[in-house]
Image (spheres, rainbow, N blue to C red):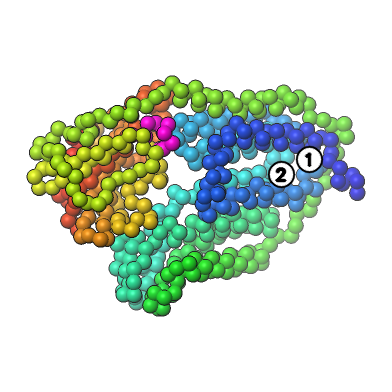
Amino acid sequence: MLQATVLPRYWQKPLLGLLLATLACITVFWETWHSITDIWYRSETFAHGYLVAPISLWLIWTRRAQYRPLQPIADPLGLLAMAGCGAVWLTADLIDVLVVQQWAVVGILICSIWTILGNRVTRNMLFPILFLLLMVPFGEDFVPFLMEYTATFVVGMLRLTGISVYREGLHFTLTSGNWSVVDACSGIRYLIASITLGLVYAYLNYSSYIKRALFILVSILTPILANGLRAYMIVMIGHLSDMKLATGVDHIIYGWLFFGLVMLLVFYAGSFWQDPPMPIPVASTSPSAEAVYPHFWLLMSAILLCLTIWPISSKWMTSHQSGHLEIPERLTQPPISPWRPTGAPNWGWEPQFQGVAAHAQSFLGNGETVAGIYVANFDNGSQGGELVNSQNVLVPQNDKIWRILATRKTPVHWPGGKPVEVDESVLNGKRQDLDLLVLRWYRIGSQNTANSYYAKWLQLLKRLSGDASPELLIVLYTETSQGEHQQARENLQKLAEACCG
């Protein structure tokens, strides 16, 4: 009994090394780790992150008898993998891609575990170790697609049911009332919860990789379908009750109850294919009682060096760059006839973004209509804001007046190449009979693009070269007739070509 509980000598230094490496990783990359936990705290969608590390440790503990006979042997390849993750972190830090920084820092932690424990032990613990990747609050990029799917599914089901419905973007109207698909309706919380539970369930109940893969696939597809059914059910309850039920907090309760029932059914169905517990393997050779972990402090020094080199490099590279806060006048006062400066119209909307270091705004008229030009400078992200950020939206979800009716791409013919497509949106103010047509794109140095990934690439090239030219977000907008936007589109296209041509 005593032999089963005493920690083998060959595990003592590796466990100490894991503790030291984890503390060093958290300390060195404190800002990135803090950004992860801050999102856990702020967003209920990612609150499960608090449980990921404890679940990982629990999964290892449940199979401790399987891991105990294995002798950790340091693997230098882990250091190379750490360096690769560190380079990814540095790149993401230079161009302010927070989610990639978070993936990279968790990857650094996982690679440090691999370095200390070696190939054999890491291979046996692979699932609990990779489970740590779920600490990263990832998934918000899928919200717009899930919202679009939910709206399409609900409207399709309503029409299939024989109920008359009119749809505008993510808003639809029934004879009983109006509905909107917002972030909370996307089902991202159900999807993330289902994937997390599905991974643990598949690991604990199946030994076949095919069964595990199939169950995880079911755990991904089921909540997507179930969320569409949930949203349809909520709308039907509201419609049939003359908007007295399922229009407040009760519709959230109904949603979670429905999701809980669906997951119970999935787990129950999965239990029919459950595999018997895997037998504990017997080591072919028993590690020597005198086995120790050689060169321990040399390895820890190498890990510490591999951790600290990246933040130091980032500080050095960013200290040699200082953005220009001024905004070129030709961007807000383009030389194009017959457009002339004019007073601000009473539209009740203007662009507003977080973390802007400086901005300039102007209004131009051509005798028939007025157009607004807004240019925001984020000063290379040094003011706490990011040029390319999913939070930089034209209309917030909770806006009481304005909403986005439609989005598309529209071409602008800038000199020197093919037409560049920019983002076009149609905004509608609920309290007035007014539509606004809005064009939006990024200008990094002398390059224009609306592609956020290409914008990040341009930022990286610019910063690696030491170029301190401004990184701008440009928005052009004008009033337009409802349902007829061609003339307004042409006006804004000409202004865009004059601004950045």
58 vs 163: above or below: above
- Distance between mark 2 and mark 1 Cα atoms: 9 Å
66 and 158: which is toward the camera? 158
Q: Amino acid at mark 1?
A: Leu
Secondary structure, magenta segment, majority class: loop
For image coordinates 41% across by 26% down, the residue present is 463
For image coordinates 91% across by 46% down, the residue present is 2
- In the image, the segment drawn in magenta is 377-386
Position of 433 compared to 469: left or right?
left
Q: Position of residue 345 (x, y in %)?
A: 18, 48
Q: Which residue in the protein does label 2 denote?
A: 124
For image coordinates 66% across by 25% down, the residue present is 302
N-term-proximal mark, 2 vs 1: 1
Judge whether residue 103 can be spotted in this image: no
- Element type at mark 2: helix
4 vs 256: above or below: above
- Element type at mark 1: loop
Is there a contact, CB below 8 Å, between mark 2 and mark 1?
yes
Tag of residue 70: 1
Position of 65 compared to 375: left or right?
right
204 vs 9: above or below: below
Q: Position of residue 472 (x, y in %)?
A: 32, 34
